[in-house]
Image (spheres, helix red, strand yellow):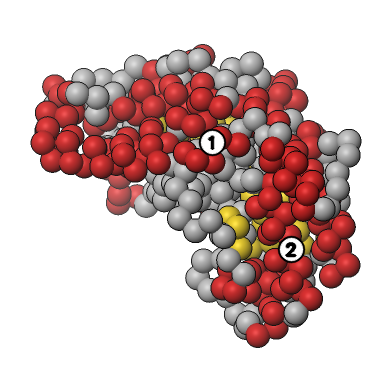
Amino acid sequence: MEHIESSREFALRLDSQDELAAYRAEFILQDPQLVYLDGNSLGRLPKAAVERAKRAVEQEWGANLIRAWNKGWWEAPARVGNKIGGLIGAAEGQTLVTDTVSLNLYKLAAAALTLQQHKTRIITDTFNFPSDLYILQGIVEMLVRRPASNTENLTMVSRPSSHHEIVRIGAIDNDITPDLAALESAIDDNTALVTLSHVVFKSGYMYDMQHITELAHKRGALVLWDLSHSVGSVPIALDECKADLAIGCTYKYLNGGPGSPAFLYVNKSLQEKLSSPIWGWWGQENPFDFSLDYEPAPGAQRFLVGTQPMISLLTMEAALEPTLQAGMNAIRKKSILMTDYASFLTDVLLAPFGFTLGSPRDFARRGSHISIRHPEGYRINRALIEEMNVIPDFRAPDNLRLGFAPLYTSYMEVREGFDRIRRVMEEKRYEKYPSSRLAVT
Ligand SMILES: Cc1ncc(COP(=O)(O)O)c(C=O)c1O
């Protein structure tokens, strides 16, 4: 944005010019005074989702019962997967909705390592979501452990190597940017898999997907992207980038609801080469033959495991509608404006109180949330939620995260949020809260 002002009139002017403004009315906004800046954690509730959940429960479950499986339930993981595929640049037949992000990472990473048996390095970074790192550590632990001699029948199906190592690339620039030079030199001929969050959860840094994928491919490594913070907020071109594998969640910018099922993407060129580490009946070639031996279903479908959470899946399908209608280019355009605007307001209104920007200043390297940092970040977050009707979230050690969901966040809401943060600082309202943390921050 060439010209930004901190006045409230300026926020009103931005709202009046906002091409996506009408979408706000498609969401439930029970409390008009609430400043909700946490759509990067749990998206607001779309009205269409309420209607769909009601129909799924009352009509499909209540009236149709088991017949509903043949009336659109059985195909739902692939059908909804294709819709999400349209948002992440994936041609049909490569994206499926299923399980959680963590489980999908497990399945795809284990499958990739099995395919790349001759290589032992897994490259990731310290910015990755901790669950992703734990899943990788668990896989390596499983591969390393030697089966005891008296458990021959329990030997793992595949043990590619006992020497896998996970390399975590660190950060530069005060924990805002990954050390790209270190990443580049870490990817070597022994690298089996590079796995990163496309937009990282704390600083909001966004990797250049095309560049990193090319680097990995030059060394024969596969790449697995976690799109949880970019799907629905940033245009993604998986096929164009020749990405191998991806996972992501649907409860953040896709507004699918708490615990709504995640998705996975497997590039067509890899589908027949990969084997899921979990052989369930939904991934079986003909599940209703009830054969006693597993035969993988063709394509990505082999990565399904068991019965899908239908109510949640169908509710999420309806929740996608506003995003599909608005289109990713319009969403990204507003998201860039909002993160620019919020960065500017941080400098002008909050820097005098000791806040610093914890996110990239270059919008091309940033997703749709920013972190603003303060040593008292945790207590400030509590005061905002409990007294000021503002909901950001806190990520240790000092990041107050502010997420901007272009379909329903207004510029005035952002401006008002900054005013309320300022009030907490002026009146030192955070001082009455303990530093000990609640279970969810
Ligand atoms: C980037 C990222 N990856 C993975 C996860 C874990 O997702 P799930 O709890 O669905 O396994 C999250 C959760 O917030 C996340 O933000």
Amino acid at the residue labelled 2: Asp
Quarter of the C terminus within the rendering: bottom right
Of 116 and 248, the residue lying toward us: 248
Q: Is residue 275 left or right of residue 123?
A: left
Q: Quadrant of residue 100?
A: top left
Establish whether ligand 1 lies closer than 8 Å to the Cβ of label 1.
no
Residue visible at 60% across and 36% down? 21
Quarter of the N terminus within the rendering: top right
How dense is the environment of label 1, judged by Cα within 10 Å: few (below 14), some, or many (20 and up)?
some
**Residue 421 x, y percent position in the rendering:** 72, 66
Of 356 and 112, the residue lying toward us: 356
First in sequence: mark 2 vs mark 1 = 1
Task: Say what secondary structure mark 2 lies in.
Answer: helix
Establish whether ligand 1 lies closer than 8 Å to the Cβ of label 2.
no
Amino acid at the residue labelled 1: Tyr
Residue contact at pointers 2 and 1, CB within 8 angstroms: no
Residue visible at 45% across and 32% down? 320
Mark-to-mark CA distance, 2 and 1: 25 Å
Q: Which mark is residue 419?
A: 2
**Residue 362 x, y percent position in the rendering:** 83, 39
Of 210 and 206, the residue lying toward us: 206
Q: Is residue 395 left or right of residue 374?
A: left
- The number of discs equals 2
**Residue 270 x, y percent position in the rendering:** 50, 18
Of 277 and 10, the residue lying toward us: 10
Report which residue position mark 1 lands on.
23
Residue visible at 38% across and 32% down? 317
**Residue 337 x, y percent position in the rendering:** 75, 38
Position above or below: 375 against 372: below
- Asked whether residue 268 is in view, the answer is yes
